[in-house]
Image: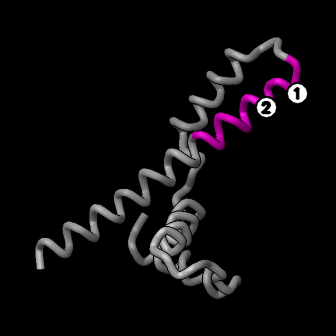
């Protein structure tokens, strides 16, 4: 994704909903993460193939159990991705300060 696409997605998100978050860096980073996540094309071929494999492995399980597993997997993946994104932005900011 190009930077101008990311900035447009962020501006659209902020224009459609007024941010309501405490005055701390984590919340600003979460807004950045959400804007990036919404505009990054989450469903790429690798992710789709991995989900197909997960569904294949759960074949025969009751639908309720499959839904519970998928929800837990998606929550874990999103939380892991969010932590990585936030830590990456923090490291980038620290690098920027060091280079100045």
Q: Gap in Å between the C-alphas at discs 2 and 1? A: 6 Å
Q: Nearer the viewer, residue 25 or 54?
A: 25
Q: Is residue 68 located in the magenta-colored stretch of the structure?
A: yes
- The residue that appears at 42% across and 51% down in the rendered structure is 84
Residue 20 shown left or right of residue 80 in the figure? right
The crowding category of the residue bearing disc 1, from other C-alpha atoms within 10 Å (few below 14, some 14 to 19, many at least 20), is: few
Residue 83 image offset from top left, x and y in percent? 47, 52
Q: Is residue 87 located in the magenta-colored stretch of the structure?
A: no
Quadrant location of the C terminus in the rendered image: bottom left
In this rendering, the answer to whether 35 lies above or below 59 is: below
Q: Secondary structure at mark 1?
A: helix
User: Residue 64 — which label?
Assistant: 1
Q: Which residues are magenta?
A: 62-76
Q: Secondary structure at mark 2?
A: helix
User: Residue 40 — which label?
Assistant: none
Quadrant in the picture for residue 59: top right
Residue 67 shown left or right of residue 41 in the figure? right
Q: Main secondary structure of the magenta part?
A: helix
Residue 90 image offset from top left, x and y in percent? 33, 64
Extreme residue toward the left, this view: 99
Residue 53 shown left or right of residue 99 in the figure? right
The crowding category of the residue bearing disc 2, from other C-alpha atoms within 10 Å (few below 14, some 14 to 19, many at least 20), is: few
Quadrant location of the N terminus in the rendered image: bottom left
Residue 2 image offset from top left, x and y in percent? 40, 69
- Check contact, mark 2 vs mark 1: CB within 8 A: yes
Quadrant in the picture for residue 17: bottom right
- The residue that appears at 50% across and 70% down in the rendered structure is 32
Q: Nearer the viewer, residue 90 or 36?
A: 90
- The residue that appears at 55% across and 55% down in the rendered structure is 41
Q: Nearer the viewer, residue 23 or 45?
A: 23
Q: State the residue position of label 2.
A: 68
Residue 68 image offset from top left, x and y in percent? 79, 31
């Amino acid at each position: 994704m190009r930077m101008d696409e990311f900035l447009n997605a962020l501006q659209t998100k902020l224009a459609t909903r007024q941010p309501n978050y405490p005055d701390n860096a984590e919340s600003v980073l979460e807004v950045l993460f959400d804007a990036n996540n919404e505009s990054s094309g989450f469903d790429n071929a690798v992710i789709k193939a991995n989900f197909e494999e997960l569904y294949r492995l759960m074949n025969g399980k009751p639908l309720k159990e499959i839904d519970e597993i998928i929800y837990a997997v998606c929550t874990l993946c999103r939380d892991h991705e969010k932590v990585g994104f936030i830590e990456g932005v923090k490291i980038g900011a620290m690098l920027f300060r060091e280079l100045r």
